[in-house]
Amino acid sequence: MEEYIVTEESRKLWAVELDLLAKFKEICSKYGLKYYAIGGTLLGAARHQGFIPWDDDIDILIPWEDYKKFMEVSSVECQYPYFFQCHLTEKNSEISNARLRRSDTTGCTKWEYLNMADPEYNKGVFIDIFPIFNVPEDEETRIKMKESIMEAWKAFRGFTALEGEANGLLHVNPEYKKYIDIYRKYSEKYTIQEIKNLYFERCAAIKEPTGIIGAVSFRTFDAKNMWKASWFEETVELPFENTTITCPKYYDEVLTVQYGDWRTPVYNGAYHEMFVVDTEVPFSIKLKKEDEKK
């Protein structure tokens, strides 16, 4: 394939993300928390010794118990300009994963830009942090667990649809409207925060270690996001730009599950996370100016 030209804007974005990675690693080291590069970041580390040239984010896996510890210490460890955005720290946060963000920058997805009308919602440049959970090896148990997780997910999406209508948002996924009645049923017993908590409790229902682990809260039992637990028992440090990043020792197997032939670069337009980016202007200022242009 032809050489892909990395722009100066991309390099500025990468620099902020590497700073976020350094902050994340610092906290993990301080509290003895495990983490692993995953997705495009693991692929970039293994194949490019850094970012995939057309990628624009960093993806991290962290065991659920360590994820909870990170949430617990984030208010102390993530002082301005850093902000740990998760279902406990951000009112409108998504429930699939967390983000470590830089509040003195702008870097948000298209979905966030169109749907997060709250001006206080943090839209700084971020790295993605996904909790990983034990996955039941018995298929019948897995099916029942998935149904339980998805019911809580649908309740949350029903809430999202109602909030979107109330705020006059035009881009809320119309599919979510099907779940409004499920949310209303749940809301008789639970607050929206309790529904989010319930979602994660159901993802973490299997307490004892199993032979399989997965990013269950991101894509429930998606085959590309489940791996043998033994592949993560040992780690290696791989070069990543100007630093190193912790990766599962058996990253070949992990990447093969996700990508198949991962050694052959394929530029397919890539799924770019960042929709509005400014590494020098805080989101609170940048997005206000963007709104004024409309």
Image (cartoon, rainbow, N blue to C red):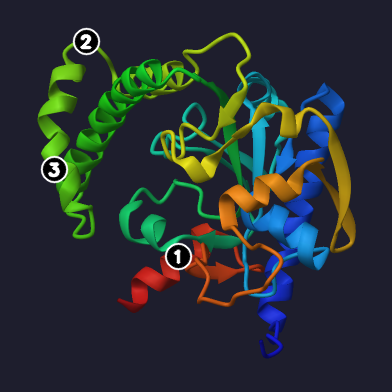
From the image, tell me which residue sits under label 3. 177
In depth, the one of 93 and 283 nearer the eye is 93
Query: Label 1, label 2: how many angstroms apart (C-alpha)?
Result: 37 Å
Q: Secondary structure at mark 2?
A: loop
Spatial CA span between label 3 and label 2: 20 Å
User: Tag 3: Cα neighbours inside 10 Å, few (<14), some, or many (≥20)?
Assistant: some
* Residue count near mark 2 (Cα–Cα under 10 Å), binned few <14, some 14–19, many ≥20: few
Which residue lies under the disc numbered 2?
189
Residue that appears at 35% across and 25% down? 146
What's the residue type where badge 1 is placed?
Leu
Viewed as shown, does residue 104 lie left or right of 49? left
Q: Specify the quadrant that holds the C terminus.
A: bottom left
| Residue depicted at 65% across the width and 38% down the height | 61
The disc, 1 or 2, on the residue closer to the chain's N-terminal end is 2
Q: Determine whether the residue tagged by mark 1 lies in a helix, strand or loop.
A: helix
Instruction: Residue type at mark 3: give it.
Output: Lys
Image position, residue 102 (x, y; %): 65, 52
For the point 16% across and 52% down, the residue is: 174
Q: Which residue is mark 1?
A: 287
Q: From the viewer's perspective, is residue 238 above or below residue 80? A: below
The reply to whether residue 102 is visible in this rendering is no
Report, in whole angstroms, how far the alpha carbon at label 1 lies from the one at label 3: 28 Å
